[in-house]
Image (cartoon, rainbow, N blue to C red):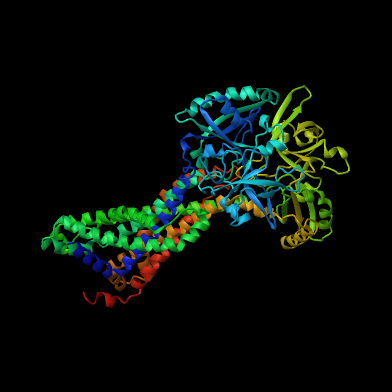
Amino acid sequence: MLKNYIKIALRSLKRRKMYSLINIIGLSTGLACAAFIFNWVSSEFSYDQHFAKKDQLYRVVAEGGVGTDRWHQSVTSLPLGPTMVADFPEVKASATFAKNDAIVEKGELKFVEDYIVFTNPSFFEVFDYHLLQGNEETALSAPYQVVLTESMAKKYFGEENPVGQSLKIYQYDPDGRGIDYEVTGVIADPPQASHFTFNILGSLQTIESVAGGELQNWGNNSYHTYVLLDEGASPEALEKKLPGMADTHMGEMMEEYDLYYRFYLQPITSIYLHSHLMYEFKANGKLAHVWIFSAIGVFILLLAGINYVNLSTSFLLERARETGVRKVLGAMRQQLIWQHLTETLLLTLLSMIFAGLLIEVFKPLFYQLSGKEFILFDRLSVALQLLLLCLPLGFVAGYFPARRLARLNTISSLKGTLSQTGRSATRSILVTFQFAITLMILVGLVVVTQQLKFVQSKDLGYDHNNLMVLRVNGNEDVRNGYLAFREELMSHANIQQVASSGSMITNGLGNGNGRVQYEDGEVRFEKLYRLPVDFDYLDTYGIELLAGRNFSPEINSDSTQAFLINEKAAKAYGWSPEEAIDKELVYSGRKGKIIGVTKNFHFNSLRHQIEPLGMYVQTNFSRITIKGKDAEALFAVAEKAWKKHFPSAIFDYTFQDQALLNSYGDDQRFAKIVNIFSVISLLIALLGLFGLVGYTVSRKTKEIGIRKVLGASANQIIAMISGDFLRLIVIAAAIALPVAWWIMTRWLNEFPYRVEMEVWFFMAAGAIVALLALAVIVVQTLRASLTNPVDVLKEE
């Protein structure tokens, strides 16, 4: 019986080649897209799930504040972890991270490495990581010890055993010329699906040996702290004890500086998708993006399924006569249902095979777009995934048309007098739903694209064009030779200005408390973000002064007793820019006067509002910024001068505008993916419309011939056919556009600086769908409208 079902199904598919091809292309594309999206979504939820003790692992974070200002940050102080272990018996162990990047040197090899994480020996116990080589108890117990990942060990030592050998690292080196670190172990490369990572682990004792007193310094919030709780311990009960600990160890400091401080716990498995605090270890994922992509995946599957149901119900009358004959010959209802289901499942099986090929072909593009090369698409797992998607889809898409066919009246079926009303209504509803989905995705595309254009073109308060930023990487030779380097650069016509600073204004800055005392004796503290600069920084970046003056090398006190603040800081203290001038400020370990107020400028991404900022002169800089007239010439001049003055230093550069673009990498990736799937969803919808209009035209061939005999023009014929479909698009727009407005408004609310939702966003999406749908209808209708009516009606 099954063999017979398959044989008939193959004949049916062969008889309607074009419609079978439309279904296979639509279904296979939908399945491939869904597989890509659902694997990406699954990977997002898999972060930090690999830790054996994940249910006992928590990160300790803080809510801080000055006065009425409040903020949440992922960093805390160095003594926090050891204190919690000592004070609370339910805390089994703690691990503290100090993240760095630095030059690593071995012989002729010299690279800038990121994710050099200094931590304590209990790291191995807390995270259940184990060394491949070395002793876990002693590997990070003394200053200037490092553990290398396998890839780092191979990079610097090849096939040699690195344990016991040394690497020169330009970090925590007292003379700024690098210092030897002993390699005490090798560890496997960490899983990529984690909110933190590392290339090199360094001993936390190194920091204490250089900056004595850090283990007692509760005021330096530069570290990430993790705790491992005893099995069965209550994190809620532990959190209730943390305020008492803060009062004991930080009470005097909080009172002196008018600080508010509260510690709380984050389950390690919730950090990646739910935590977006200040100073995260690295950029986390966004739960909103996960839900949006999940919805897109479901929608694309629905579009493909709707195509099949629509075309199946369209051919119901033709299949009805076949069904009537089968019933007369004794076929049972169950047999008829299974016959139709076999045809559907065979088509979905062919679609599944083609989907597997599409996945294999487009897998490199998926890796490039998602940045998640750790997602594996082995053939067995892909086959199982497609099977799990195909069987329900094929069953749902085939069962209802099959059930309707099996229940038809035998005499009506044979006469061909089957009513079309119910099926036309069903098809209309499905087509409307299909275009509603497409319109929502297209509106999302327009809004995301416009928001990205907005953030990339917004005035940031400084000129970021043709700015090259060089990293010093702790090299004392660069600091000592800076003035000669700058002098040579300024001798070139293409170089406009050169400055040094302590940070790059792209992804935020560190902060500290700024203290002022008013005339009435009131003392006030405000959080000021910190930007150490030199005398030429404002001119190099084109930052405007609203009041006062810039730092001057002619005034000695400017180097040690002067501050610039931005207008946001002046407002926080209750001053106008003019009123702030000559006010005393105690900030960042120095006391001096405010000599100037700058116009607000962005020193973080546009996902963050402009915050109060303090600037002061500091010679111990980490960045050199060069302003040129032309980027290409700027690069050539800077590289040549760098190699001349600092031949042993790495020429580590970036351009400010490129760094700004990189800061929106996740949003750019999001936009690209939405763009691709918007186009795919639109093509699937149009593919279904192509088949549906073709069938409609074939059913109305004689009606078209009669209308032409009675004088109807080709345009009138096209208008007759397109009218019904365009009405459905209008209904779809009425449903979809308000929903799309609500969804995208919520997405835009994540940005403090955002584009305004404009009517043309929605009109553009509607126009694209309507015009492309009309083009499909015209293509399918034009041939029938130009056919000689004699050829159509001669059989009558």
Residue for point 35% across, 74% down: 786
**Residue 239 screen position, x and y as percent:** 53, 27
**How many marks are shown on the rendered structure?**
0
Quadrant of image for the C terminus: bottom left
Specify the quadrant of the image occupied by residue 422: bottom left
Residue for point 46% across, 35% down: 55
Residue for point 82% across, 35% down: 561
**Residue 415 screen position, x and y as percent:** 15, 64
Specify the quadrant of the image occupied by residue 352: bottom left
Is there any visible trace of residue 740 in the rendered image?
no
**Residue 103 screen position, x and y as percent:** 69, 50
**Residue 759 screen position, x and y as percent:** 52, 50
Quadrant of image for the N terminus: bottom left
- In front of the other: 287 or 322: 287
- In front of the other: 548 or 650: 650
Horizontal side of 139 relative to 714 (left or right) equals right
- In this rendering, the answer to whether 773 lies above or below 521 is below
Horizontal side of 441 relative to 20 (left or right) equals right
Specify the quadrant of the image occupied by residue 9: bottom left
- In this rendering, the answer to whether 355 lies above or below 565 is below
Residue closest to the far right: 554
Is there any visible trace of residue 297 in the rendered image?
yes
- In this rendering, the answer to whether 63 lies above or below 770 is above
